[in-house]
C-alpha cells in the first residue's frame, strides 16, 4: 500500500520519519527494479481491447456452508440437509436456500459453480491464498493477489489506485500465515490501496486522502522540500535508484491525495439515503456500495472482505460452539446482511450499465462439513464448496458442476482454485500464458501453464 505517512523509527526535525518515505517508494529491497516498474507501466498503457473490464471480488471470509446456502440437499438426512428449505429462483436451473431470498430474485444474473475443492490443509489462511492468487504459498514464495497482478499488467486509470481492498485486509484467522491480499513477489509498489476505515460510520473518512497533520498543505504541495528531507536523512539517497522509485510512487500517492476524482469516488455521503439503505447501513453493505462507486470512477479491481477475522465477530465460520455461531445464528445474523448487500450491488450495476464489463465473483476459502456437528454447526471442509460469478461476460442463471448427494465431494466437473483465478483473468481478457517477473526476475506464469478458465460460465 502506498502511504505518505506512517510510524517510523528515525525522525527528522520536521517530525517526518525516514520510514514514512521508504513506505512510499523503496522497492529494491522487495525485488522490484526500476526497469520492471517502467515495463509494468508500459504494459498498462497498452489498450488491448479489454481495458474497460473490471472486477469486484467479494471474499466470504469464514466460509459459508454450501448445504445451507448455494447447494441445498433437500432429500438428504436431516443431519446433513440442515434446517432450511430450498426455494425456486429467477433461474429455472437453480435452487437456493430460503435464507437467501434476495439472491433468488437476481439468480438470472449470476451463475454457480458447485464443485469447487482444494487439497490443502483445512485452515482458513491456506484457502485465502489459493482462492485469491491461484496458488498455495510454498518455498517462501508469496504469489500476488489477482488484483495486484492486474495493476502490474494494466496499470492504473487516472489518479485512482489499480486495486482497492475494502474495508481493510484480512486479520488473524488462526493459521498465522499470509492471506494473499498483497502483491507478494511483485513488491510493495503493486500492493493494494487499503481503505482502513468503516464506511458505515457517521464520521467515515479515507485516511490516505487526508494530508498528514505533520506536513502542512503548502509543504505537501512542494515535493522538492520533502525530497530534501530524505536526502538530509540518508546520505546519497537522492541519486540512488530507490530515490527514483520513491519519486514515481510519491507522485502516485500525491496525485491520489490531491485528486478531486478520488475524493468524489470515496464520498459516500453524496449517495441518496434510499440507496444507502438499500445496500444496508452496515459495514459490508456500505463497502459494496463503495465498490460500485469506485468501479464507476475508474478503479479496475476491488476486493471486499465480508468479514475481517473469525474471532471477534459472528461470521460464516459456524462451528456452533461459542465464540462461533450455529447454523440458526447464520440465518439470523449473517445471511440477511449479505443477501441484501449482494442483491443491491448486482441490481445497481445492472441498472447503471456497469455489470456487462464488471465481473462480480463471490469466493470462500472452503466449505463446511456435510454432517452437522453436536454443537449445531458445521466445521471446515475443503473437499467441496461453491463459488459464483456475475457480469464480466459470464452468462447468468447457470449451474456449473455438481456435488454428490450429501454435498461432500464434487460429482461432476471438479474445479480447483487455480481455475477460479484463471476465470477472473479470462474475464479481464488476460492471456493465461502471461508471465510476471517472479523471484530473481524469472518469468512466473499468472496461473500454472495448462490451467484453464471455467468456460461453461461464458
Image: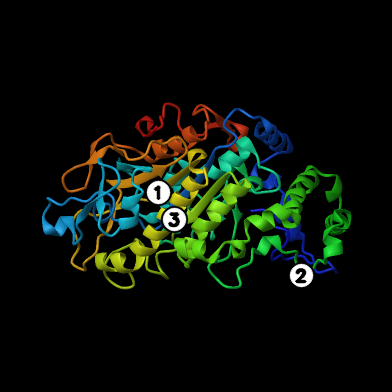
Residue drawn where x is 86% and y is 59% of the image: 229
Of pointers 1 and 3, the one earlier in the residue sequence: 3
* Residue 24 visible to an observer of this rendering: yes
Q: Residues within 10 Å of mark 1 (few under 14, many from 20)?
A: many
Image position, residue 174 (x, y; %): 41, 62
Label 1 vs label 2: CA separation? 39 Å
Foreground tag (3 vs 2)? 3
Contact (Cβ within 8 Å) of mark 3 with mark 2: no
Q: What residue do we see at 73% from left, 57% from top?
A: 257
User: Circle 2 — which element?
Assistant: loop
Q: Is residue 272 left or right of residue 448?
A: right
For the residue pair 221 and 31, the one nearer the viewer reads as: 221
Q: Residues within 10 Å of mark 3 (few under 14, many from 20)?
A: many
The residue at the point 75 percent across, 66 percent down is 212
Instruction: Answer with left or right where residue 135 lies relative to residue 329.
Output: right
Q: Which label belongs to residue 344?
A: 3
* 65 horizontally vs 424: left or right: left
- The mark closer to the camera, 1 or 3, is 3
Residue 363, label in figure: 1
Instruction: Pick whichever, 182 or 402, lies toward us.
Output: 402
Residue 116 appears in view: no
> In terms of image quadrants, where is residue 378?
bottom left
Q: Position of residue 362 (x, y in %)?
A: 41, 49
Disc 3 from disc 2: Cα separation: 37 Å
> To which residue does mark 2 refer?
213
Residue 192 x/y as whole percent: 60, 50
Question: In which image quadrant can residue 64 be found?
Answer: bottom left
Of labels 1 and 2, earlier in sequence is 2
Instruction: Point out the tag, 3 or 2, that comes first from the N-terminus.
Output: 2
User: Taking 46 as reference, is 287 above or below it?
Assistant: below
Amino acid at each position: 500500500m502506498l502511504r505518505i505517512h506512517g510510524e517510523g523509527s528515525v525522525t527528522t526535525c520536521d517530525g517526518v520519519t525516514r520510514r514514512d518515505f521508504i513506505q512510499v517508494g523503496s522497492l529494491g529491497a522487495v525485488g522490484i527494479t526500476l526497469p520492471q516498474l517502467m515495463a509494468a507501466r508500459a504494459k498498462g498503457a497498452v489498450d488491448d481491447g479489454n481495458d474497460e473490464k473490471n472486477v469486484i471480488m467479494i471474499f466470504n471470509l469464514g466460509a459459508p456452508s454450501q448445504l445451507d446456502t448455494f447447494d441445498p440437499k433437500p432429500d438428504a438426512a436431516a443431519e446433513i440437509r440442515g434446517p432450511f428449505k430450498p426455494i425456486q429462483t429467477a433461474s429455472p436451473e437453480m435452487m437456493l436456500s430460503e435464507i437467501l431470498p434476495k439472491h433468488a430474485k437476481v439468480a438470472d444474473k449470476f451463475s454457480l459453480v458447485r464443485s469447487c475443492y482444494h487439497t490443502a490443509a483445512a485452515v482458513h489462511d491456506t484457502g485465502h491464498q489459493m482462492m485469491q492468487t491461484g496458488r498455495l504459498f510454498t518455498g517462501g514464495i508469496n504469489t500476488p493477489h489477482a488484483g495486484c497482478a492486474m495493476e502490474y499488467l494494466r496499470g492504473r486509470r487516472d489518479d485512482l489506485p489499480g486495486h482497492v481492498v475494502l474495508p481493510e485486509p484480512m486479520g488473524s484467522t488462526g493459521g498465522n500465515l499470509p492471506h494473499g491480499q498483497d502483491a507478494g513477489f511483485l513488491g510493495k509498489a503493486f500492493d493494494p490501496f487499503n481503505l482502513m476505515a468503516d464506511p458505515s460510520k457517521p464520521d467515515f473518512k479515507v485516511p490516505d486522502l487526508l494530508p498528514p497533520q505533520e506536513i502542512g498543505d503548502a509543504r505537501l504541495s512542494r515535493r522538492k522540500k520533502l525530497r530534501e528531507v530524505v536526502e538530509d536523512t540518508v546520505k546519497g539517497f537522492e541519486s540512488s535508484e530507490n530515490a527514483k522509485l520513491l519519486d514515481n510512487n510519491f507522485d502516485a500517492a500525491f496525485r491520489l491525495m490531491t485528486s478531486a476524482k478520488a475524493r468524489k469516488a470515496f464520498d459516500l455521503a453524496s449517495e441518496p439515503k434510499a440507496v444507502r439503505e438499500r445496500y444496508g447501513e452496515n459495514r459490508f453493505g456500505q463497502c459494496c456500495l463503495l465498490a460500485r462507486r469506485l468501479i464507476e470512477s475508474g478503479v479496475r479491481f476491488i476486493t471486499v472482505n465480508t468479514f475481517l477475522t473469525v474471532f471477534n465477530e459472528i461470521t460464516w465460520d459456524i462451528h456452533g460452539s461459542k465464540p462461533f455461531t450455529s447454523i440458526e445464528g447464520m440465518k439470523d445474523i449473517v445471511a440477511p446482511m449479505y443477501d441484501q448487500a449482494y442483491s443491491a450491488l448486482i441490481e445497481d450495476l445492472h441498472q447503471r450499465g456497469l455489470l456487462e464489463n464488471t465481473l462480480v465473483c463471490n469466493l470462500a476459502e472452503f466449505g463446511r462439513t456435510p454432517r452437522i456437528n453436536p454443537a449445531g454447526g458445521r466445521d471446515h471442509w475443503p473437499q467441496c464448496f461453491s463459488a459464483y460469478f456475475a457480469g464480466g461476460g459470464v452468462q447468468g442463471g447457470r449451474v456449473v458442476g455438481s456435488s454428490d448427494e450429501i454435498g461432500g465431494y464434487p460429482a461432476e466437473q471438479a474445479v480447483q482454485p487455480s481455475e477460479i483465478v484463471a476465470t477472473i483473468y479470462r474475464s479481464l481478457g488476460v492471456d493465461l500464458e502471461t508471465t510476471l517477473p517472479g523471484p530473481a526476475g524469472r518469468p512466473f506464469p499468472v496461473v500454472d501453464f495448462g490451467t484453464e478458465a471455467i468456460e461453461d460460465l461464458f
